Image (spheres, rainbow, N blue to C red):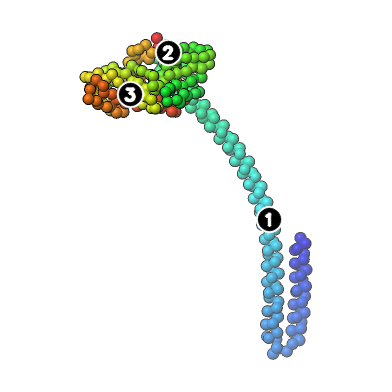
Amino acid sequence: MYNNKKAETLGIIITVVILIILVILTNVENNNLSYIENIANKLVNPIQNGLTYVKNKMHNNSSFFTNVSDLKNENEELKNKNSQLEEKLREFESVKAENQTLKQYMNLSEKYKDYQTIAADVISRDISNYSRTIVINAGKNSGIKENMTVISAEGLVGYVISSTANSAKVQTIIDSSSNTSCVLSSSRESIVCKGILDEKNTLRAVYIPTEATINQGDTIETSGLGGIYPKGIYIGKINRTVNTSNINDRYAFVETAVNFNKLETVLVITNQN
């Protein structure tokens, strides 16, 4: 406000000076009028332009600072709304994950409805080169015992080797000490699938009958022999065959249906025997 009054006072003074100059000019002879007018214009116009510029600048600055204050308030409001949205998103993701887990349980139960099963989550993995075991969050208190078969939506996982009150350790079929009695689903020929050191999702199929025809893409499932796994649980498919000089020694690689790197949800079969 002070700056505005100062500018207006200065403007009044200059206006008075201009009026005085005009009065003087009216008493000057006409011949010298145009010359004097030119001089006056050269003196007065820059001053008037300067005052106009200063006045406009002051008004613009006032508007500018008002806008900056408004923008700060809007920015704070947007930050608060963004924080609220992020919190709701986290809650949504949590609910989504819970629903996904429940859906997996339901799908598993429907797929293996002929079995009595107990659902569990994988809570730990053995990552050593010599062992491939997992720990699940269900144990004796849930009715889980040793030698019970463990499966997933994709296929065979392994079997329970030990249990505590609320957890159980499972030896997976990719463990290097694992031997699983299997059959080729196409020819029904019996074979054995073994775990391989340093392999996470691959088995070695051995003891292939000499008369058996085995091709890439053939599917493998449990045979029901051996007293551990029930018959007909999907294991995987032949990935590659290897012929040797002795046909009795030929073997094949089986890609497991279960991705053990991403395994999270399992079912333990409790009524297989």
Relative to residue 166, is residue 24 drawn left or right?
A: right
Secondary structure of residue under mark 3? strand
The residue at which mark 1 appears reads as 65
* Residue beneath the point at 26% across and 18% down: 189
Residue 55's x, y, as percent?
A: 70, 65
Task: Tell me the quarter of the picture where residue 235 sits.
Answer: top left
Relative to residue 94, is residue 62 drawn left or right?
A: right
Question: 195 and 93: which one is in front?
Answer: 195
The residue at which mark 2 appears reads as 147
* Residue beneath the point at 75% across and 63% down: 3
Residue 116's x, y, as percent?
A: 43, 13
Nearest-to-viewer mark from 1 and 2:
2
**How many angstroms separate mark 3 from mark 1 (CA)?**
76 Å
Question: 218 and 36: which one is in front?
Answer: 218
**How many angstroms separate mark 1 from mark 2 (CA)?**
77 Å
Relative to residue 218, is residue 163 drawn left or right?
A: right
- The residue under label 2 is which amino acid type? Asn
- The residue under label 1 is which amino acid type? Phe
